[in-house]
């Protein structure tokens, strides 16, 4: 009888302690779990017109993070991360590596970073609880502080604090994208595939694009929390036309900006939205600016119009 009581107390006391945990603490525990836990997550990514099944594994080998992502449908496509090097392996091209501390296409990089960085753009609010992948999950809402970005909902496993589901929602609560775990397995040591990945000799990191011909485009306005994370200047294959690429993020929402010399073809007057991905084309001086991202079209238009040369 005593053993039964002790087992019941072990189940009850953590849940009681969790009742008083603020939303930010839940997210901080999630961030730590994503960096420290040894686990395998089978995931379904849902968008408006397609479903994509994924498998993601994470662990630590010799105190270094190792992760593996596999796309289960279509041609073989995998990604491996060892420390801050991510290598992409696809069937129709040689493997290549880039510097990055996360694999894009699963959870946002901000999930493994400082949660305080997201507070500029979002409020953290506790939600309800439900069962996902056979596990009790606690919902945390990330409500935008302004109209320039969308909101998010995250369900965290109440045992491991790993994310079980992630929704992107428009201002009128329409679902744009969802990642949902259908099976979560925790390991006591890194799976063998990660140990082998750690030992593997991966391709050297590709050189960053040279920007000596790039122009100094700057933004006179960006939504709070957004910053430039990538600048790239290159020439299009065939036409050799120079294009400037600028990537922006607030940790959750990502925006891509393309700047090229204005051509003779008129820019489209209508804004295009598909699967939550908005596109805006604007003429800024003698340049054409195309902005793409999963944010409101009004945000993209204002960012594009704020570009200026310095």
Image (cartoon, rainbow, N blue to C red):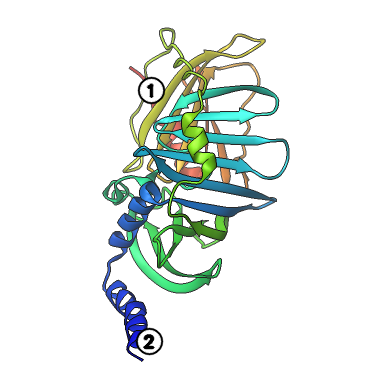
Can you say whether 96 is above or below 116 in the image? above
Can you say whether 140 is above or below 98 in the image? below
Q: Out of 289 and 162, give the one closest to the viewer.
A: 162
Q: Residues within 10 Å of mark 1 (few under 14, many from 20)?
A: few
Give the mark nearest the N terminus, 1 or 2: 2
Q: Residues within 10 Å of mark 2 (few under 14, many from 20)?
A: few
Asked if residue 134 lies left or right of residue 108, the reply is right
Residue 220 position within the rendered picture, expressed as x and y whole percent measured from the top left? 33, 30
Q: Out of 49 and 188, give the one closest to the viewer.
A: 188
- Mark 1 — residue? 308
Q: Nearer the viewer, mark 1 or mark 2?
A: 2
Does dot 1 land on a helix, a strand or a loop? strand
Q: Out of 126 and 42, give the one closest to the viewer.
A: 42
Residue 198 position within the rendered picture, expressed as x and y whole percent measured from the top left? 46, 33
Can you say whether 210 is above or below 252 in the image? above
Residue 28 position within the rendered picture, expressed as x and y whole percent measured from the top left? 30, 55
Whole-number angstrom distance, CA of label 1 to CA of label 2: 69 Å
- Mark 2 — residue? 4
Q: Quadrant of the N terminus?
A: bottom left
Residue at 65%, 29% in the rendered image: 90
Tell me if residue 213 can be seen.
Answer: yes
Q: Quadrant of the C terminus?
A: top left
Asked if residue 94 lies left or right of residue 97, the reply is right
Please tell me in which quadrant of the rendered image residue 249 appears: top left
């Amino acid at each position: 009888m005593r053993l039964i009581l002790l087992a019941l107390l072990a189940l009850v006391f953590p849940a009681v302690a969790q009742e008083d945990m603020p939303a930010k603490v839940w997210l901080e525990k999630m961030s730590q779990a994503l960096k420290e836990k040894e686990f395998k997550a089978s995931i379904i990514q849902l968008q408006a017109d397609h479903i994509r099944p994924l498998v993601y594994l994470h662990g630590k080998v010799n105190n270094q993070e190792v992760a593996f992502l596999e796309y289960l449908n279509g041609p073989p496509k995998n990604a491996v991360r060892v420390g801050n090097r991510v290598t992409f392996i696809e069937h129709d091209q040689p493997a290549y590596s880039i510097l990055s501390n996360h694999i894009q296409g699963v959870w946002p990089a901000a999930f493994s970073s400082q949660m305080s960085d997201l507070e500029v753009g979002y409020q953290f609010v506790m939600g309800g609880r439900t069962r996902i992948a056979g596990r009790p999950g606690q919902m945390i809402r990330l409500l935008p502080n302004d109209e320039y970005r969308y909101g998010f909902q995250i369900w965290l496993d109440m045992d491991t604090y790993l994310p079980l589901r992630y929704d992107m929602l428009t201002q009128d609560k329409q679902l744009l994208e969802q990642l949902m775990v259908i099976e979560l397995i925790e390991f006591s040591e890194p799976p063998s595939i990660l140990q082998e990945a750690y030992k593997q000799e991966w391709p050297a990191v590709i050189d960053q694009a040279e920007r000596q011909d790039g122009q100094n485009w700057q933004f006179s306005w960006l939504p709070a929390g957004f910053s430039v994370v990538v600048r790239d200047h290159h020439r299009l294959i065939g036409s050799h036309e120079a294009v400037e690429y600028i990537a922006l993020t607030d940790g959750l929402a990502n925006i891509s900006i393309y700047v090229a010399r204005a051509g003779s073809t008129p820019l489209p007057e209508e804004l295009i939205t598909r699967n939550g991905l908005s596109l805006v084309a604007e003429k800024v001086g003698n340049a054409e600016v195309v902005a793409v991202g999963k944010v409101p079209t009004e945000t993209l238009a204002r960012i594009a119009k704020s570009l200026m040369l310095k």
